[in-house]
Image: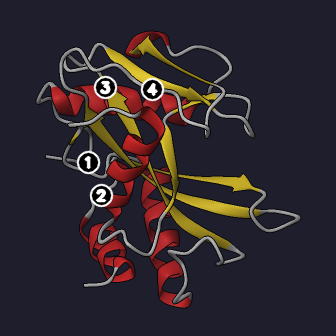
Amino acid sequence: MTLHADAVAVLSSWSAPSAEEEALRKEFLEHLRTHDDAMSRTCAPGHLTATTAVLSHDGEFVLLTLHPKAGMWLPMGGHCEPEDATLGAAALREAFEESGIRGLRLLPGPLALDRHKVWCHPPHSWHLDVEYGAVAPPGAEPMISDESLDLKWFPVDAVPEPSDDATRRLAARARRVLRGETVAGRG
């Protein structure tokens, strides 16, 4: 199965937890249907990306990166690469590359969808973001990468400014999944 086919399968079977995300799910599937290169950063109107909220082993903290281009505290994430077999694999790879934490465990997902404007292709394009959660092993020590200005653990309930609602939503959903709680639209 190709990464493109995996994305279609993942999004076709995903139950969106909100009406807004259901509309995004349909938009992402249409984008995949009409763009063979939808998984590649070369797809100018927009492309699918993978993001991961990395939680501490107990789910109390989320690791965020101070993104150099956005100037905000955000979860780990980025473009899919040709070697990524699945969206989940892309999300886990990005989380490891940006956090330096070995032994991350991906939570069942995706947990959320988000669409945001970026400048990959001037004047702009879109990241069609498929979002996951992962859990760090106890005692995990993150290592800042060259893709970040800073990297810090924050309480899930106290994501700092500047950030965005999508980051807060993803961190909260990841913690609920880790705790075995139901996320609306999911089992």
Q: CA distance from mark 4 to mark 2?
A: 22 Å
Asked if residue 180 lies left or right of residue 8, the reply is left
Marks 2/1: CA distance?
19 Å
**Residue 88, labelled with which disc?**
2
Label 4 vs label 2, nearer the camera: 4
Question: Which residue is rendered at x = 26% and y = 25% of the image?
Answer: 175
Q: Nearer the viewer, residue 100 or 178?
A: 100
13, above or below 130, in the image: below
Nearer to us of marks 4 and 1 is: 4
Which amino acid, by three-letter code, is at mark 2?
Gly
Q: CA distance from mark 4 to mark 1?
A: 35 Å
**Residue named by callout 1:** 185
Dot 4 or dot 3, earlier in sequence: 3
Query: What amino acid is labelled 3 in the image?
Result: Leu
Compare marks 4 and 2 and give the one earlier in the sequence: 2
Residue 55: which numbered mark, if any?
3
Choose the circle earlier in sequence order: 3 or 2.
3
Q: Position of residue 125 (x, y in %)?
A: 74, 65
Among numbered discs 2 and 1, the one appearing first in the sequence = 2
Q: Label 2's element?
A: helix
Please name whichever residue, 148 or 9, is drawn nearer the observer in this view of the structure: 148
Element marked by disc 4: loop
- 57 with respect to 36 (left or right): left
In the rendering, which numbered label is found on residue 143?
A: 4
* Mark seen at residue 38: none
Q: Residue at x 31, y 25 (%)?
A: 55
